[in-house]
Amino acid sequence: MKYWYLNNNIIVIIEDSIYIGNSKKYIKSELISKFEKEIIPNEIFNIPFAYIKSIENPKEKKIITISYGNDSSEEIKINNLKVKDEIFNYLKEKLSKLEYSRKKPSVLKHAKAPLFAILFVSGIFLWTFYLANQIAKGYEYEIASGRQGIGGLILGMAQFGTKKVILGYLFILSIAILSLYTKLKNRTLTEYLTRKQ
């Protein structure tokens, strides 16, 4: 058994599991005494090694991410980078069957959410701009079903006119592009432990 007591976090690694918990409700000396006797409080969250699919250790970030089960993941915040690497290396040793690799995450992985936002906002803009332009030409529109849905929202925004629609789109687009730029800039060399398929 090995454990780390990090500010308000507890990380305990035993033969077949990693335990992650908040130490605020425990008295440090009592908790450490229990660890020395290999006693772990029941409420501390545990991930059995057999469930772990992958572990990510971004070199310049203060987190380790453990993916497990179907689509679950646990992000462990560790302020001390040296201790973070120590924990990752210990897991690497314990989980020797997992494949180790080291690379920068793909652009697509980092850019997926902002790119989706840009495409979605652009689609909404084109629809709104078209309606705003038609309204400016004198056409009238109303929601056929009488219920307010996305069509009602688009029509409501189109009432502001083409100039305001364009300005609103450019404002939202600039936020999405800034988010994309920030995400791509923050790509960092990452160590991976991955379970072979």
Image (cartoon, rainbow, N blue to C red):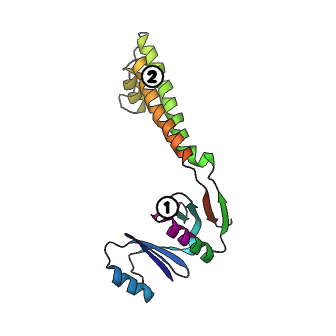
Residue 162: image location, x then y, percent: 43, 18
Residue 137: image location, x then y, percent: 44, 10
Residue, disc 2? 166
Q: How far apart are marks 2 and 1 (CA)?
A: 39 Å
Residue 26: image location, x then y, percent: 32, 77
Residue furthest toward the bottom? Answer: 37
**Depth-wise, is mark 2 or mark 1 nearer the camera?**
1
Q: Earlier in the sequence, mark 2 or mark 1?
A: 1
Viewed as shown, does residue 178 lie left or right of 42? right
Does 90 appear in magenta? no
Viewed as shown, does residue 75 lie left or right of 188? left
Q: Which residue is drawn at 48% across and 27% down?
A: 125
Given residues 123 and 29, the one toward you in this image is: 29
Viewed as shown, does residue 27 lie left or right of 117? left
Q: What stretch is highlighted in magenta?
A: 68-88
Q: Residue at x 38, y 28 (%)?
A: 152
Pointer 2 local density, CA inside 10 Å: few below 14, some 14–19, many at least 20 = some
Q: Look at the numbered discs 2 and 1 and tell me whether their residues touch, using CB distance below 8 Å.
A: no
Residue, disc 1? 63
Q: What residue type is labelled 1?
A: Ile
Q: What residue type is labelled 2?
A: Ile
Can residue 175 be seen in the rendering of this structure? Answer: yes
Residue 84: image location, x then y, percent: 51, 67
For the residue labelled by badge 2, is the local secondary structure a helix, a strand or a loop? helix
